[in-house]
Amino acid sequence: MKISVITPVYNAEKYITQAVESALQFEEVCEVILIEDKSPDNALQVCIELAEKHDRVKLYQHPDKGNHGAGATRNLGLEKATGDIIAFLDADDYFLPNRFDAEKELFKNPNVEGVYGAIGVHYYSEKAKEQYYNLFEDRLTTVYKKHHPKDVFPGQMHMRGAFGLFSLDALTIRRESLNKMSPFFKTHLRLHQDTEFLFRLSYYLDLYPGILDKAVAVRGVHEDNRITKVDSGKINPATTRVLLWREVNKWSENEDTIPEEIKTHIKRMHRSFEIAIAPTFKKWGMIAKYLVTDYPSIRSGLFNINFRKDLF
């Protein structure tokens, strides 16, 4: 098993060394691919030094050396990868020593196209913990029990709260299986492109549970996380999520084998976020319309905290 670890690097000079070294601890990791995305800090220089120090660290930038976002950056990493297995690691996160314990056994089965596990959380400062503990707490981000691969996509769509979540840091994919997907990451989504990717991935690939009861990787939380900027109000969460669900809805409409009940659920999630961000005069018109034509869309919205915030 030869693993390529893909790490997009942006504004992460404080954290990237820890991330790289956490990946290099595994002899199965044949390369750590750093894609530097025009960071405003000193991350490029740190990456250069890491590439000079470690033979398995490979450093790339976009051809124009510009900033293209996490989606395009991960796509470039996928282009450059040479391993037969792909893993992802964000530059401010890190792997734990058990990261690939389950994968070593599971990938012996050729039917296993991907494996997902659990991730923990680490607060890099007391300020970050005070500010974002309510969001992440100290809990695992995980799927709560082992499911058959065919149940992973419906579980994420219908029962995300009850089913649980997995993240890129704890995802390992057979590289050849990715050929079932095109494109990989949607580059026009500046946020939530990883969530959209995971939705489609769980539809096209057979994903198996790895270690779910303990962390295999750790999410680093600090004041500059993309997700914390959304949570702090600098970016409207409903606005970013309506773009996500619009994209998922567009995709699902073109997939004939997605069950109609799941397509309907996706459409209603999209509508509920559209209502949440609509101007007040338009919002109430949309609510009146859907109360008559599609009441479940309104019900979906009422379970959506951003919908309720913007509505009342």
Image: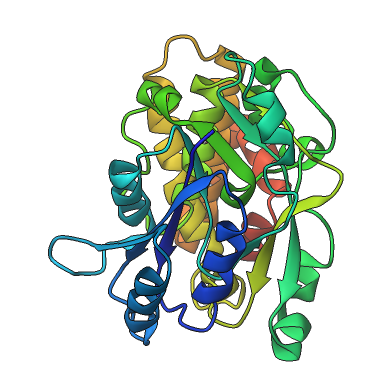
- Looking at the image, residue 165 sits to the left or right of residue 64; the answer is right
Task: Name the residue rendered at 31%, 68% in the picture.
Answer: 37
Residue visible at 76% across and 81% down in the picture: 129
Residue appearing at x 54%, y 49% in the figure = 273
Nearer to the camera, 168 or 245 = 168
Query: In this orientation, does residue 296 appear?
Result: no
Q: Residue 278: percent from the left, percent from the top?
A: 46, 57
Return the residue found at the far top: 257
Position of 139 with respect to 250 (left or right) is right
Colour scheme of the rendered structure: rainbow
Figure check: 306 above or below 292: below
Is residue 154 among the parts visible in the rendering? Answer: yes
Horizontally, residue 158 falls left or right of residue 280, namely: right
Left or right of 123, for residue 86: left
Residue 240 x, y percent position in the rendering: 47, 58
Residue 146, how many percent across, how many down?
Answer: 81, 27
Q: Quadrant of residue 46?
A: bottom left
Instruction: Residue at 76%, 45% (x, y): give it.
Output: 142
Total number of numbered discs in the rendering: 0
| The C terminus: image quadrant | bottom right
